[in-house]
Structures are given as C-alpha cells and as structure tokens.
C-alpha cells in the first residue's frame, strides 16, 4: 500500500484516524495503530510481515539480555548478535543475488543466481531497529519492556515503507505519552497534502518525461537536448518523489501525535557537495555519521578510510547494483576533491558559481543513479557529449522542450525555499487574512482543491511509481 493511492486516502487513513481519535488512552491508541500498521505492510507483503516481526523480536529480546547482563562482555555479545542477525537478514534478501552475480564474473565459476524478492522497506526498518539496540548499549536510552510497543515503533506505518529513518531515541517518550490535538491534525493534514502534491502532481509528471526520453525504443538515437531534458526531469522526479513521501510521513505522524525530524531541507539550493548532503536525506546521512563514521574514528583517525567506507555503504544501501556503488564512490571522490581544493577557498568562490558547479555535479550523479546497466549509462554519455546523427536538438527534442519547459521552471522554483520566504516577508498581512472571515473559508477551500487535484490525477492515471520502494 502506498500513501498516494485512493484506497489509502479514502479508506485506510480515515478509518485509522477515526478509530484512534475515538479513544484517549495511549495504550489503546498504540494497539489500534499497531494493528493498522501491520495490515498496511501485509497489504503488499503478506509473507514478509513475519520477517519484520521476527527481526523486531530478536532485537528487542537482545535489548533485554543486554540490560540484564552482568558483565561488559555479555553486553557486547548481545549487541553483536542483534546487529549481526539484523544485517544478515538485510544482506540475504537484498544482496544475495547481487553477490552471486559478482562471484560469477570469476573464471570457471558459475552459480545459479537466486531469485529473491525484496521485502518492502527492509533497509529502513532494519536501520531503525538498529538505532534502538546501539543507543541502548551506549546508555542513551532505557530498555523497552513491552515488545508490542517496540514493534509499533518499528512498524509504524507513516515511516515504515520509505522513512525517514526515525531513531528510537527521538520518539521514545511519544510511545507512552503523546497528545492528538486539533492543531496537530490541521498542520498534519496540510503537510501531508503538500507531500502528496509533490508526489502526484510533480514527481509523477516528471517520471513520464523521463520515460519518454530514456525508455523509448530509439534511446540510442536521441539528441543531446533530449538527454539533457531526461536527466533534468529525473533530477526533479527523485527529489519530489522522496521529499514528498517524507512530507507525507511527517504529516501523518503529526495527525497521530508523533513528531518526526525533517528529512530534506531544500538540497538543490546548495553551493557545495558537503552542504548538499546536509540537506538531502538527512536521516540517512546522520545515521551513517553517528553509527558508522564516528565509531570508526571520524575525523580523528583514518579519515580517508572512514569516508570511503561510509560512501561505499551509502551507495550499496540504495540498491544491489554496481551503479549504486559507483554513485556512492562518485560522491566520495567529489567530497575529497572539495575538501582539498574548494572548501579552503571559502568565500573567494562566489556562491552563485558554487551553486552552479554543485548542481552540475549532482545532476550528473543522478545519471549514475538512474542507469542500472552500463550500456544505458554509456549511451547517455554518448548522447550528452557526442551528439552524433541526431545532433544537439532534433525536432523531437524541440517539441518535448516546448511541451515541458513551463513545468520544469515551476518544479525548479518549487524546489527552492521561495514560498517559505514569501510567507516570512508577508507574515503580518498573511496572518490578518488567515484570521479574517475570508481566511477561515479560503484555507479549508485550498485544502479541498489540492486534495481534489491529487485525487483527479490518481484517478486519471495508473502510472504511480515510487522510486524508494526498491531500497
């Protein structure tokens, strides 16, 4: 089940909200949310729900053993066992086939590649569960005595499928004490609808442009202008797809009294690669920083090795394919170069130039991310730097650019903090309008119109992909 589906919008979510709001006791609300969350996951993965429950139980049980351990050695054994079992499960389901394919490249070796379907959201819920056992070992949180409460944390449907990666420490107290308020409901609905609009009205439209440019039968003969349009559309798609889903998750959390941390902060306005990764997929970046980079030694020792390991695993986390590893190592190389030559220059490099160079690097990086097969990637490079027979811009490219230019401009503007800036500058008059009789009518009307547009778009098209489901 996905958030951007009519069944979720008009059946699952209303019934869940109604059931939870009818009771004021947190323990009963938790039971209702747990039931709905397990149903949510079972809707698409009826078999793998057992994997989610078993993984959660193993880590929860390891936490109990750790808390009652008499020695430090026993505590470490509990930690290592929990981490090893969780990562072994992730490695088997996500990477077994990939590893066999790599082994088959060796001479005189040929194994049958196992066909294992990937459990939805396994990367996210595994990392979330690991934050609990690691923080418990560090003494930063108290053990969770209730398995069902811990299972709710792991399986909570707003962030179960595609994050953000919610650390146990961030919502530890909210599992036992939280308030569902009218203000939270209003702000949650607004945030959810903003994310839904990102996904349905922008990301889905951009994905259709990508498909026209890169998935056509004559991809090898497209012009340079068509290749540029395709990668720009994918740049838009992946941002609005993932940030939109994160917005929906944060909004849903607010509706039920949970407060999740932000996952995106307008990454496309960055003037350095370092800044970009402070703004993009924040929960993943901080996870690797706090649970891998710093424990390995951080900046204090073996900095180059630590950085390499983090970016190798960042790429591998995104998918069982060599292109994702190369994408991660691409950023490893960029950050090393930037640290050595760009950052020391500081203010001597104009921000506009820094932003332009950063975005060119990011957009090129998305080509590594998109093309899972080397042939497709090298064909794209050929069309980009060697126009060939189609030239820079053939008739098809001119038509496509004419059709989609206004959309590109609107989408790129929407990827910047212009709207929050306008709200800040005109804060007083906007507040006066909100508090006026007209404002009390316009706000719910705007929400209704946005919901109608999203509903109409979903009803009119069966094309509703979500990129991060495969991660």
Image (cartoon, grey):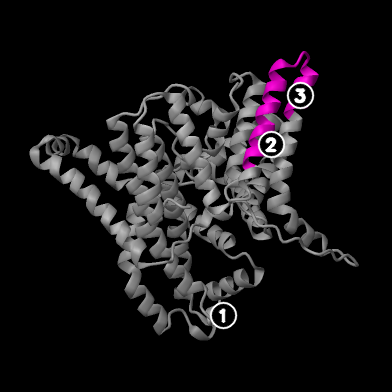
> Does the residue at mark 3 contact the one at mark 2 (Cβ under 8 Å)?
no
**Looking at the image, which is closer to me, 185 or 128?**
185
Q: Nearer the viewer, mark 1 or mark 3?
A: 3
**Residue under pointer 3:** 76
Classed neighbour count for the residue bearing mark 3: other residues with Cα under 10 Å, few (<14), some (14–19), many (≥20): some
**Looking at the image, which is closer to me, 306 or 104?**
104
Task: Give the Cα distance between marks 1 and 3.
Answer: 54 Å
Q: Is residue 170 among the parts visible in the rendering?
A: yes
In the rendered image, residue 42, in percent from the top left (x then y), is placed at 55, 48
Element under disc 2: helix
> Does the residue at mark 1 contact the one at mark 3 (Cβ under 8 Å)?
no
First in sequence, mark 1 or 3: give its number. 3
**Residue under pointer 2:** 303
In the rendered image, residue 358, in percent from the top left (x then y), is placed at 49, 52
Range covered by the magenta-colored residues:
52-79
Identify the residue shown where x is 34% and y is 51%. Answer: 10
Q: Which mark is residue 220?
A: 1
Classed neighbour count for the residue bearing mark 1: other residues with Cα under 10 Å, few (<14), some (14–19), many (≥20): some
In the rendered image, residue 192, in percent from the top left (x then y), is placed at 35, 45
């Amino acid at each position: 089940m996905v958030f951007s589906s009519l069944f979720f919008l008009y059946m699952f979510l209303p019934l869940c909200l109604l059931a939870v709001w009818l009771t004021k006791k947190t323990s009963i609300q938790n039971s209702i949310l747990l039931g709905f969350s397990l149903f949510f996951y079972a809707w698409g993965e009826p078999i793998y729900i057992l994997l989610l429950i078993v993984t959660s139980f193993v880590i929860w049980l390891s936490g109990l053993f750790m808390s009652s351990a008499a020695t430090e050695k026993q505590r470490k054994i509990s930690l290592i066992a929990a981490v090893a079992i969780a990562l072994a499960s992730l490695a088997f389901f996500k990477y077994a086939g990939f590893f066999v394919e790599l082994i088959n490249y060796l001479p005189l070796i040929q194994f049958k590649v196992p066909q294992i379907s990937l459990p939805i959201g396994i990367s996210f819920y595994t990392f979330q569960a690991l934050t609990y056992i690691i923080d418990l070992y560090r003494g930063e949180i108290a053990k969770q005595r209730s398995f069902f409460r811990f299972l709710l944390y792991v399986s909570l449907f707003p962030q179960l499928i595609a994050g953000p990666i919610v650390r146990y420490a961030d919502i530890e107290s909210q599992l036992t004490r939280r308030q569902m308020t009218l203000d939270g409901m209003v702000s949650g609905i607004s945030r959810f609808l903003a994310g839904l609009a990102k996904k349905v009205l922008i990301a889905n439209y951009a994905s259709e442009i990508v498909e026209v440019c890169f998935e056509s039968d004559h991809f090898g003969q497209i012009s340079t202008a068509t290749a540029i349009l395709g990668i720009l559309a994918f740049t838009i798609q992946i941002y609005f797809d993932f940030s939109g889903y994160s917005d929906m998750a944060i909004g849903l959390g607010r509706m039920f009294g949970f407060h999740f941390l932000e996952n995106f902060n307008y990454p496309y306005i960055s003037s350095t690669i370092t800044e970009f990764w402070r703004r993009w997929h924040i929960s993943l970046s901080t996870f690797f920083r706090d649970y891998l980079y710093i424990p390995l030694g951080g900046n204090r020792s073996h900095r180059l090795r630590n950085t390499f390991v983090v970016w190798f695993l960042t790429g591998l986390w995104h998918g069982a394919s060599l292109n994702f590893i190369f994408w991660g190592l691409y950023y490893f190389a960029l950050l090393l170069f930037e640290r050595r030559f760009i950052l020391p220059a500081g203010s001597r490099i104009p921000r506009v130039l820094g932003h332009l160079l950063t975005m060119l690097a990011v957009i090129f990086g998305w080509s590594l991310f998109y093309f899972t097969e080397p042939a497709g990637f090298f064909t794209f490079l050929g069309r980009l730097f060697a126009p060939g027979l189609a030239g820079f811009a053939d008739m098809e490219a001119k038509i496509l650019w004419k059709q989609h230019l206004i959309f590109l401009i609107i989408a790129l503007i929407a990827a910047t903090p212009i709207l929050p800036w306008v709200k800040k500058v005109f804060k007083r008059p906007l507040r006066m309008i909100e508090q006026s009789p007209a404002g009390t009518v316009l706000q719910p009307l705007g929400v209704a119109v946005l919901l109608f547009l999203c509903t109409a778009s979903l009803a009119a098209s069966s094309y509703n992909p979500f990129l991060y489901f495969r991660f």
